[in-house]
Amino acid sequence: MAVEIYEPVDAAANTETERPIPSPCIAACELNAKQICTGCYRHVDEVAGWKQMDNHQRRQVLAAIQQRKAQRRTGLLGRLTGRRH
């Protein structure tokens, strides 16, 4: 009887079979002065290039979105409290 050994699959490294990460678009599209969508926090170039990106690139954009959201919250907090962060 033969024994098969299965190696764990690293989903991040296996982009050929991984499902594409969906767009973070929330259909509230409006660009600010920095060309960032105020709905999904992507730069206009990231919106335009999303379909051509692989999942690694999409994860990088999602990380940038989180940073932009954090910066916006910090900026709003500073305006509400009169402090600058």
Image (spheres, rainbow, N blue to C red):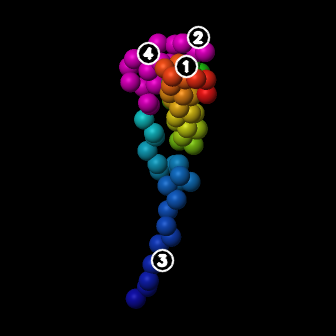
What crowding class fits label 2: few (fewer than 14 Cα within 10 Å), some (14-19), or many (20 or more)?
few
* Residue at the spot of label 4: 29
* Residue at the spot of label 3: 5
Label pair 1/4, CB-CB below 8 angstroms: no
> Magenta residues, as a range?
23-40
Q: Does 11 appear above or below 60?
A: below
* Residue at the spot of label 2: 33
SS for dot 4: loop
The overriding secondary structure of the stretch rendered in magenta is: loop
Along the line of sight, the residue nearer the viewer: 66 or 50: 66
Residue type, mark 2 in image = Ala
Between disc 2 and disc 1, the foreground one is: 1
Q: Does 1 appear above or below 23?
A: below
Horizontally, residue 22 falls left or right of residue 34, namely left
| Residue at left offset 46%, top offset 40% | 20
| Residue at left offset 58%, top offset 11% | 33
Residue type, mark 4 in image = Cys
* Residue at the spot of label 1: 82
What crowding class fits label 4: few (fewer than 14 Cα within 10 Å), some (14-19), or many (20 or more)?
some
Mark 3 or mark 4, which has the lower sequence index?
3
Label pair 2/1, CB-CB below 8 angstroms: no
Between disc 3 and disc 4, the foreground one is: 4
Residue type, mark 1 in image = Gly
